[in-house]
Image (cartoon, coloured by chain):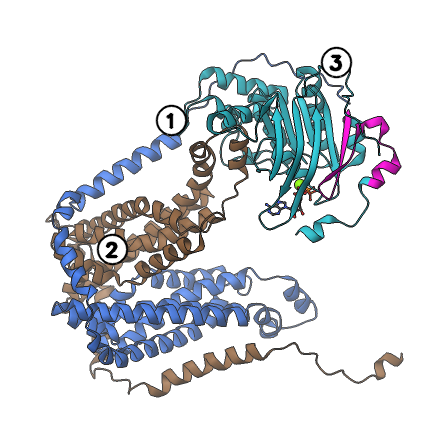
């Protein structure tokens, strides 16, 4: 075969410089970050504390699990779940109008959609902790402040997910309602909502999983939930208390993720 | 053509089977809402009664202390650096780990099971709680933040990445196995080429999330702009808080955009 | 080319049930939809519209029940102008026209019964639809329509559990439940296999013959058009280029209708 005599042809290259540029950018970013960083200062007794924490985690303070005073592990975990649950519920309701505002359906003026999307991004970026502190100013340091912070903050993400669901909606079913003589409201009730609902519920459950994590944090600033006893235990260096609380959080989050995840699987 | 006669409709509509499931779910939902509202003392009227308190803060935020901007630049840069370093370390550890928990690479269910269990546990702990813990261990400063972000990234990228590895096309693996390749060669020539672009994408995605997260880690002492945020909040200087919120917002927008564009180019 | 205004069916009364007067349609983006169409369709006819992709067949169908507004001209349904109809009157005219779509346009996650019932939407005030309050008589009516297309046993199944052919027959049942004088079908068999196609076409034919419902259908297959239609209308680049009984549509005529470049390319 004479084809075997041919030399290996030079590799044909598309215009790949944007790719190289992107790689160079990522590399430069990493180098910049490492080079300029001040010395990695660590407490001299870090190893010792780490050891005590580990031993605390393996010898949890079982007595704290239930004491019946409303400030034990089970009570605060339940409160955490309650904050996430009602906060997510409030947020789902508030999200609906925002979602329709931000959804990019054909008929809408682009500025409307853009401004809606921008507002949602702003809400999402507003630190939840700051929000919680603002609500604490209004309603006092309580679980209710946590509910408000979770409820408000979640709107940023939930309304975005909802608006995407609305954008992806196939309007064929709506068209068939119109062709049978239905009004716009009929289309909404008979086609839009039934098609949208499972998606919305699924999004809400997903957001609930994240809200559980938020609600566990907000106690740091006094907005209820498991965060408060955890931060107290850490500053008191009560490591076996820290251990049992971490264990509680891991179990709670795992359980909620599992239940919510299985419901979501069934919905789709 | 129309040879079958149209079925003459005579039967009456049969009864609909009762939807127990729906009823139970609805009842559970309502019970859950009522219980949660009671548990957290939800009091919407009280919120509206005290709404002026909320608005007072909001008013102060509407007139930001612009002169403070120059003070927040340095901690902001520190924050971004924390995010970059944390993401890099976390992602680099996550990559090999992801191969170890992928069932199409490691057949031993016991190994993948245990390693996945660890990964899942790590994913359950909220970032700020991890940060508080590491501040207690290594002391106040960005190191606690970096460790937190690295662990957080490890959990996130590890999961995304092993899912990508598990959904690759098995054809090339089979082909290489058939030609006598060993495990390393298979990973190198059949798996990595298929997933490398995902890895970069997840790295950048985790970076976006970490930039957001890192801005508040300082609240518990883990370095970055959050330290200043905590001070301003403690002094009720909402005009300064709003500057920081604005700057964070701007940075997040820019980084999201740059990261998105980079991902588009690299994918 | 043979133009014929006389109805081809024997028992045709004098009044047309659908009448196009100089109808033109230009889309917002400048694409030509229809150009000066004159057309009379009489009760009981089975009219098949054929033409190249992008010729304007769908536009023609959708103009009839005003899912699309026309640019100029007038369309009358049973002597009433749908072009000029407003509010309630428009909905009332639409209610008398059933429509079947290429991709079925069912609410996939709702039950078959729910989907068929939406055909009745034009007979209810909107507030009743908000609560989904359909009368028992209408449920029975919907069930009867389902039996007509041999799907009585699927009444409580979810729409997405059915095969494509079954879904299309559900949408026929939905149109029937509307109690229409006219059924519009826009490529109802385009996504079905030959066997299922036959089943759906047979159902439409029987509806036409046994219930006397006028059928206006657009098909891509000339063979099917000849087999089932009583009259053929040919559309090319928005213009009517043929109109006559099936028998007069010989091979030369057909190739004339399908001549010229694919109009879709310039439109899309
Ligand atoms: N919503 C729309 N907006 C703008 N132009 C459109 C729209 N719908 C159709 N057109 C254009 O109008 C012309 C006629 O389209 P129409 O859908 O009626 O064709 P058709 O004969 O049904 O084709 P097909 O067989 O592919 O369904 C085409 O040029 C098309 O690009
Ligand atoms: Mg069409």
Return the x and y of residue A14 as percentages of the image width and height. 65, 76
Q: Is residue A35 magenta?
A: no
Region of the chain picked out in magenta, as a range:
C229-256
Report which quarter residue C54 is drawn in: top right
Instruction: Give the residue pinned by disc 3.
Output: C11
Q: Residue under mark 2: which chain is it in?
A: A
Image colour for chain A is brown
Q: Can residue C61 be seen?
A: yes
Residue B249, given in percent of the width and then of the height, sits at: 32, 67
Secondary structure type for disc 1: helix
Instruction: State the image quarter where residue C64 is shown.
Output: top right
Q: Are marks 3 and 2 in contact (CB under 8 Å)?
A: no
Task: Classify the position of ligand 1 by quadrant: top left, top right, bottom left or bottom right.
Answer: top right
- Say whether residue A137 is left or right of residue A4: left
The residue sitting at the top extreme is B10
Chain C tint as drawn: cyan
Q: Would you say the beta carbon of the disc 1 residue lies within 8 angstroms of ligand 1?
A: no
Question: Is the residue C49 above or below the residue B166 in the image?
Answer: above
Are labels 1 and 2 assigned to the same chain?
no
Q: Residue at x 30, y 70 (%)?
A: B248
The disc label shown at residue A18, or none: none
Q: Which residue is mark 2?
A: A215
* Above or below, C266 relative to B209: above
> Depth check: C83 or A222 in front?
C83
């Amino acid at each position: 075969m004479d084809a075997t005599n041919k030399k290996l042809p030079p590799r044909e290259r598309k215009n790949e410089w944007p790719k190289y540029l992107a790689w160079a950018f990522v590399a430069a970013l990493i180098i910049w970050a490492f080079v300029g960083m001040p010395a990695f200062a660590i407490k001299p007794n870090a190893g010792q504390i780490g050891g005590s924490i580990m031993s605390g985690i393996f010898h949890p303070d079982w007595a704290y699990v239930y004491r019946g005073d409303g400030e034990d592990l089970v009570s605060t975990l339940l409160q955490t779940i309650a904050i996430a649950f009602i906060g997510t519920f409030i947020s789902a309701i508030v999200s609906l109008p925002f979602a329709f505002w931000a959804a990019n359906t054909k008929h809408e003026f682009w500025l409307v959609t853009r401004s809606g999307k921008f507002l949602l991004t702003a809400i999402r970026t507003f630190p939840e902790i700051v929000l919680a502190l603002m609500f604490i100013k209004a309603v006092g340091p309580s679980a209710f402040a946590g509910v408000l912070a979770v409820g408000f903050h979640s709107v940023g993400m939930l309304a975005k997910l909802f608006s995407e669901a609305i954008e992806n909606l196939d309007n064929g079913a709506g068209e068939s309602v119109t062709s049978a003589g239905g009004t716009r409201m009929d289309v909404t009730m008979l086609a839009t909502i039934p098609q949208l609902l499972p998606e919305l519920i699924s999004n809400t459950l997903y957001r609930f999983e994240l809200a559980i994590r938020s609600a566990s944090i907000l106690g740091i600033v006094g907005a209820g939930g498991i965060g408060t006893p955890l931060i107290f235990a850490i500053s008191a260096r009560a490591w076996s208390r820290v251990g049992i609380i971490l264990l509680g959080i891991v179990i709670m989050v795992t359980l909620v993720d599992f239940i919510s995840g299985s419901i979501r699987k069934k919905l789709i | 053509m129309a040879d079958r006669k149209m079925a003459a409709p005579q039967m009456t509509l049969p009864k609909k089977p009762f939807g127990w499931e729906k009823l139970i779910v609805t009842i559970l939902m309502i019970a859950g809402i009522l219980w949660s509202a009671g548990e957290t003392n939800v009091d919407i009227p009280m919120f509206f009664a005290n709404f002026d308190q909320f608005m007072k803060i909001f008013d102060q935020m509407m007139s930001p202390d612009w002169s403070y901007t120059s003070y927040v630049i340095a901690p902001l840069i520190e924050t971004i650096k924390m995010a970059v370093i944390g993401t890099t370390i976390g992602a680099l550890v996550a990559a090999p780990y992801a191969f170890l928990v992928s069932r199409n690479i490691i057949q031993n269910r016991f190994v993948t099971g245990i390693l996945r269990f660890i990964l899942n546990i790590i994913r359950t702990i909220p970032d700020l709680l991890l940060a508080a813990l590491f501040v207690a261990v290594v002391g106040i400063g960005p190191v606690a933040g970096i460790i937190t972000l690295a662990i957080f990234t490890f959990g996130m990228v590890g999961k995304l990445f092993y899912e990508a590895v598990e959904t690759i096309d098995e054809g090339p693996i089979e082909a290489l196995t058939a030609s006598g390749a060993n495990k390393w060669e298979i990973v190198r020539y059949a798996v990595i080429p298929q997933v490398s672009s995902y890895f970069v994408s997840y790295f950048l995605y985790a970076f976006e999330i970490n930039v957001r997260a890192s801005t508040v880690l300082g609240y518990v002492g883990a370095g970055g702009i959050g330290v200043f945020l905590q001070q301003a909040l403690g002094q009720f200087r909402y005009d300064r808080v709003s500057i920081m919120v604005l700057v964070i917002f701007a940075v997040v927008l820019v980084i999201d955009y740059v990261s998105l564009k980079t991902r588009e180019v690299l994918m | 080319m043979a133009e014929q205004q006389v109805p081809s069916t024997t028992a045709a009364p004098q009044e047309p049930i659908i009448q196009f007067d100089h109808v033109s349609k230009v889309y917002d983006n400048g694409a030509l939809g229809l150009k000066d169409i004159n057309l009379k369709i009489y009760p009981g006819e089975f009219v098949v519209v054929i033409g190249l992709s992008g010729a304007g067949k769908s536009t023609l169908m959708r103009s009839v029940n005003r899912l699309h507004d026309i640019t100029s001209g007038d369309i009358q349904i049973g002597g009433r102008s749908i072009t000029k109809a407003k509010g309630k009157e428009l909905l009332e005219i639409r209610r008398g026209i059933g429509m079947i779509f290429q991709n079925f346009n069912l609410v996939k996650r709702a039950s078959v019964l729910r989907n068929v019932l939406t055909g009745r939407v034009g007979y209810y005030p909107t507030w009743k639809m908000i609560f989904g309050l359909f009368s028992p008589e209408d449920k029975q009516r919907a069930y009867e329509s389902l039996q007509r297309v041999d799907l009585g046993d699927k009444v409580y199944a979810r729409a997405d559990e059915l095969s494509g052919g079954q879904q299309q027959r559900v949408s026929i049942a939905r149109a029937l439940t509307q109690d229409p004088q006219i059924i519009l079908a826009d490529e109802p068999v385009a996504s079905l296999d030959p066997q299922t196609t036959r089943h759906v076409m047979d159902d439409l034919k029987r509806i036409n013959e046994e219930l006397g419902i006028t059928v206006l259908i657009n098909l891509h297959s000339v063979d099917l058009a000849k087999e089932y239609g009583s009259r053929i209308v040919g559309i090319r680049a928005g213009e009517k280029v043929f109109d006559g009984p099936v028998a007069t549509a010989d091979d030369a005529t057909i190739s004339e209708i399908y001549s010229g470049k694919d109009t879709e390319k310039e439109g899309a």
